[in-house]
Image (cartoon, helix red, strand yellow):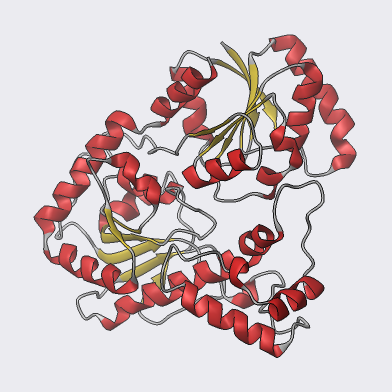
Amino acid sequence: MQILYIQTDSILTREVERAFQLAGCSLVYQPAPSQDDSDSANYLSQLLTKIKQSDPVFIFSLDFYPFLSLACGAMGLPYVAWLVKGYDADYYSATIRNEWNYIFAMDSLLCQELRNAGVPNCFFLPLAAPSYGEDTCSGAPNNEQCSVDVSMIGTILERSDLPVHPLSPENSLKDSTKGYLEGCIACQHQFHGMPSMSSSLPGYVWEDLVKVFPPTLENTILSAYQFYDYNYFNHLITYADRDVHLNAYKNEKRYEKIHLYSAASSYSSDKIINGGWADYYNDIPQIAQQSIINLVITHRNYKAGIPPIAWAIMGAKGFLLSNYQADYQLLSPASPVLYRTPKEMLSKSAYYYHHEEERIAITEELYQEISRKHTYYNRIQEMLSMLS
C-alpha cells in the first residue's frame, strides 16, 4: 500500500512513520503546506507531481491541514488526518466536514464533539507509547536508583511570557471584568472536570470580553465559548494548575529534590530546579526512571485524552501520577495512579513514595500492558482496519 505521508514537526512522526512501515506500507514524503497562502499554487503543483508519480491510496498527515483537504477533494483522493494535539484552530476549520476526510482524534471527547458538529468520518484513536527499547526499560528503578523525588515535565509560563490575553495588565478590559476572570481561574485550577470557563460568564463580563478581544470565527465551526477557552483561559488555568500544585510539594519535608522540565520562560521557584525543556526521545526516558514520582498535570485543552508525555513516562517504565483523564480507562485492567484534587495528589504521592514495592508493581504492570496493546504499530493497524 502506497501512502503520501505529509512530513510535519510533530514529535510523534518518527513513531508513526515506523509503524506504517512495519504494517507493510510504502511511504512517499511531501512537506506540510506552509501557513503562507501566497505559495499555495507552487505547493499544489508539487503535490500533484508527487501524486502522479506515486499513485497513493490516500494522503496522511499528523494533525489537519485545510489546504490538503481541499486538494484531496479536487483530486478525488481520501485525506486521512490524525489529530494528535489537545487543540489546534485547524481542527475546527469548516473543511474538516468534507466527506472525503477520515479524521482520527486522540481524545474521545474531541472525537464526539466533532461528530456532533457534523464531521461525517471521525474516529477515536488514542496516542500510544513510544518504543524506547529493551535497554532503556530493562527494569523498574527502585528508591536507591532514583536521584529525584518528584519530576514534572510540562511548561509553566508566567503571564508576562504569553501573548496579550484578557488578564494582561496592558489591555483595556474593565477592572471588574478582570477581577471576575481571576476568581474563575482560582476556582477552576482546584478541580479538573468543571464546566468550561467561558460557558458560565455573566453578561457584563461577556460583553466586555467580546468588545476588547473579539473572537475570530470566520470559516470555522468553533463557537465563541470554545474560542476563548482554547486560546486564552485554558492556558491560564493550566499554568496556574502546574505552578500551585507543583509548589505544594515544597512544604513536604520528604521531598528534597523537585525538578521541573519546562520550555524557556521567566518562571522560577525556590527549591524547584528547572532543567529546561526535555527531549521526547533523548531525555524523557532518563528523567522518568530517575524520578520516584513523575507528575503529569494535563493541559486543559485536552478534554479526556492522554497526553504524549504520560505515554512516554509509561513507555519508559517510570512511575506516573496524573490528574484524572477519562481516556485512561483504555488501559484497564492496568491503571496508573490518578488524582482528582490537589489534596489527593499529595496524599497519593506520599503513599507511593513510601511504598516502593507497590509502585514498582504498578509501573511494571502498566509497561507490560502498553507493550502488548498500546504501541504505535497497534494504532496504525487499528487505523488501517477502520479505513478498509
Q: At 30% from the left edge and 36% from the top edge, which residue is drawn?
A: 370
Mark yes or no: residue 32 visible: no
Q: Is residue 354 above or below residue 38?
A: below
Give the image location of residue 323, x and y in percent: 36, 60
Is 83 placed left or right of 222 in the picture?
left
Residue at the far bottom: name it. 175
Q: Is residue 145 above or below residue 35?
A: below
Mark yes or no: residue 273 visible: yes
Q: At 90% from the left edge and 40% from the top edge, which residue is drawn?
A: 38
Number of marks in picture = 0
Q: At 23% from the left edge and 36% from the top edge, which residue is drawn?
A: 368
95 and 207: which is toward the camera: 207
Is 276 placed left or right of 59 in the picture?
left
Q: At 39% from the left edge and 50% from the top edge, which residue is drawn?
A: 326
Q: Which image quarter is the N terminus in?
A: top right
Q: Is residue 307 above or below residue 99?
A: below
Give the image location of residue 15, x and y in percent: 47, 32
Q: Within the image, what quadrant is residue 72 found in?
A: top right
Q: Is residue 144 above or below residue 24?
A: below
Give the image location of residue 46, x and y in percent: 81, 23
345 and 140: which is toward the camera: 345
Give the image location of residue 214, x and y in percent: 79, 67
146 and 334: which is toward the camera: 334
